[in-house]
Amino acid sequence: MLFCLKPCGRRVVFPVFPLRDTITYHGAKAATFGLLIVTGLAYLYQLSQGITGYEAVFYSYGFIPSSFFQDPAGQFYTIFTSMFVHGSLLHLLSNLWFLWVFGPAVEGRLGFSRFMLLYLLSGLAAALLQGFALPESTIPMVGASGAVSGILGAYLILFPRARVLTVIPPFIFFFFWLPAPIYLGYWIILQFINGLFAVPGVAWWAHVGGFLLGLVLILILRPKRNYRADPFWECWRDYC
């Protein structure tokens, strides 16, 4: 999952990939599916603009810190539009996959409205933290991973006993289960390390900002108590 700074860095930054978890989802998942569809349609719109227009979308709808701090009111909308713009098909699919794996369980506890509030506010926090980290940057920041990071933070609080089926791609596909706190803890530590060492091409502090807001906001949103571990996958995990 990447929040990309155009041009996106070409490096493997998260080799342990999630496949699914042990949570049985309750309730509608309209917000998750809706975000998947709208974000996918936004990328099709980018492609329809041709080569020149494709790049222009980044500067029209991406979040540019220097432009934002010069004109906060006029550029405020880009905080939200940037969540639906992606630098490449791989960038898009990685973000949507993380949303698909972790989103339904969180939405099942929050419902449509509070889930959308969590998603959008996490994206807001992600953009602002990255902006404060690099206030003079003229590079557009695009991608949904700041918002999705908030979902991951909320998931960690809501489901501390869940497990995540993971795989190490691309050459040796080794499948194994990890407790959600270990998996997500590894993920957020990786974001901190890359942010501190200023690894280029990815908005690492956006991931951190979204994740931290998700941790805090989920304590305020008062989620419902209506989930359980999936017994089939719990059993399969024990013999995996």
Image (cartoon, grey):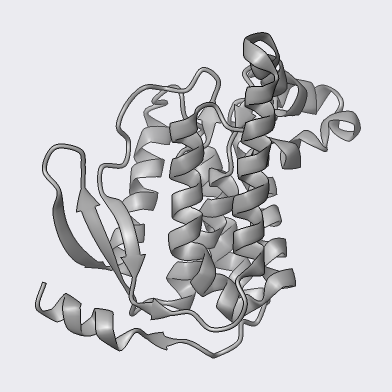
Q: Position of residue 206 (x, y in %)?
A: 55, 41
Q: Nearer the viewer, residue 181 or 7?
A: 7
Q: Residue 210 appears at what percent x and percent y?
A: 57, 51
Task: Name the side, left or right, on which 43 lies relative to 94.
Answer: right
Instruction: Identify whether 188 is placed above or below 199.
Output: below
Quadrant of image for the C terminus = bottom left
Residue 182 place in picture, x, y as percent: 28, 63
Left or right: residue 108 compared with residue 131:
left
At x 34% / y 65%, what residue is drawn? 20
Q: Nearer the viewer, residue 224 or 66?
A: 224
Q: Which is nearer the eye, 167 or 125?
A: 167
Q: Residue furthest right?
A: 73
Q: Residue at x 34, y 70 (%)?
A: 21
Looking at the image, which residue is at 9% across and 78% down? 239
Q: How many marks?
A: 0
Percent coordinates x, y for residue 3 in the rendering: 52, 36
Whether residue 166 appears in this view of the structure is yes
